[in-house]
Image (spheres, grey):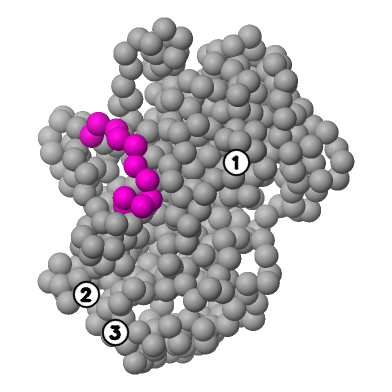
Amino acid sequence: MAQNSAEAYPPVERHPETGISVLVVGAGVGGLCAALECWRKGHKVRIVDRTSKPDTGGDFFSISPAATKAFRHWPEMNAKHLAAARQPYNANYLLTGEQTRKHMPFMVDTTDENGKAVTTVLTQYRHSRPKLHGILIEQLAAIGIEVEFNHKAIKYEETADKGIVRSEDGVILEGDVVIAADGLGTASYELVLGHKLRARSSGYAIYRTAFPAEVVTRDPQLSQHYRLLDIPKSTPIDIWLGPHIQVFTQLTEDIFSWSMVHKDDGKAQETWHSTSHTCEPADAIKHIEDAQGFCPEILKKTMLATPKDKLLDWKIMWRDSQPNWVSPQGRVIQLGDAAHTFVPSSGNGANQAMEDATSLASCLQLAGKDDIPLALRVHNLLRFERVSCTQITGFQAQINRNNVDINALTAKPDQVVGKWGRWIWAHDPEQYAYDNYEKAKAHLVSGAPFENTNIPAGYKFKPWNIDELLAIGDSGKQIVFEGDWS
């Protein structure tokens, strides 16, 4: 079966129908990608969300080539994605005002088509979350699937052959498979884990906002500092570093955003959806002034330009890596933040949710309707160690920034540049599922040997917990593991 929403684009090629009904709960980026990929793999899809309309909250996030591999199968959507995405160019400043690094892209060491070692620009897709969300919603509508809103899942259940969701409005929903993609507060923990997932405060929070770029560009002083680069499809990002404070600003043609990691003062909440934790720019300015006695004038003016009620304070929480995402009878599976949370500044949460979507849809296709529980467990096996390693990189980046040697930044500005190893950006989750499904299945069924190869080369996976990582961070050391994470 093929679908073509515009004559200018090739059709989306759909695999033969599997007879599997999939209910996706949660219309965030991960849930939307799961709905799209499940449809493409031949499954019958229904998607619901707790909100009353499409979610337009959020600022910017980066997506790696690995997360968008599946977009090649969606010609029109891929074209819209490429048109909307921007390549980030980062500059570093000390919070005192000194610039230590000019705007530069992420560079990676890799090999060319001849196997020769080269250093090149890593393609990153910097997206406005609401814009990408809209692109995914449009593609779903083009294949005849509409998100059903006002269905907040309050209880997950299952039988031997169905996953069941009870929503707050009294509606009972079901499918051969239920994908719990409804985020941090998912009610699926009770069924999958038997308890809520333990979270602990990191001691930090992050102010976050995004608003029309004209708010900044119409101001003579701010427009002199915040300028688009003379590089097509780029976006300048400024990173300001001080004692336990990091400020990030970003400008595109139509959107400006800023965020600031700071010591948590007890007022932050871990949600986009509550309006009770909006705060004032003066709160952020005070954190900087308390840390070093003054706030650079350009940052103060930037923060004060924030429109009223547009600034949120997000509590940064730590959670242990959770190895099991599948319900006891194998009819409900968690995806994205519901399965594995990331700190907001990790740059990997959306990536791993999108990879989950591609892998899960492929595993269900390979298994067929008679083997759904095993398909979910194979997917879990293929994904958990990789996700756990990317969680480590997020914690590592946050702790290392908190412990950065400010005095050494001028001499070594790259010490705070994010690390995106080849194992992260070159991965293909669809092909990995196809290549490894039978081997992983044999491991689960008969105990045959199996090792994942989608984690850093030379690293043998070990379970970890937050207390261990925090102990390293509290000692002032940087988190380092064996293997090639670069």
Magenta stretch: give its range.
459-469
Q: Residue at x 57, y 35 (%)?
A: 193
Location of residue 431 in the rendering, given as x and y in whole percent from the top left corner: 41, 23
Location of residue 167 in the rendering, given as x and y in whole percent from the top left corner: 80, 41
Mark 3 falls on what kind of element?
Answer: loop
Whether residue 118 is in magenta: the answer is no
Which badge, 1 or 3, comes first in the chain's sequence?
A: 3
Whether residue 468 is in magenta: the answer is yes
Q: Using the image, determine if residue 154 lies above or below residue 440.
A: below
Give, as a three-letter code, the residue at label 2. Ile
- Quarter of the image where one finds residue 10: top right
Q: Is residue 42 left or right of residue 225?
A: right
Mark 1 falls on what kind of element?
Answer: loop
Residue under circle 3? 97
Tell me the crowding category of disc 2: few under 14, some 14 to 19, or many 20 or more residues within 10 angstroms, Cα based. Answer: some
* Residue nearest the viewer, comparing 371 with 68: 371
The overriding secondary structure of the stretch rendered in magenta is: loop
* Residue nearest the viewer, comparing 134 with 60: 60
Q: Which mark is residue 406?
A: 2
Q: Which mark is residue 195?
A: 1
Location of residue 238 in the rendering, given as x and y in whole percent from the top left corner: 36, 71
Q: Quadrant of the N terminus?
A: top right
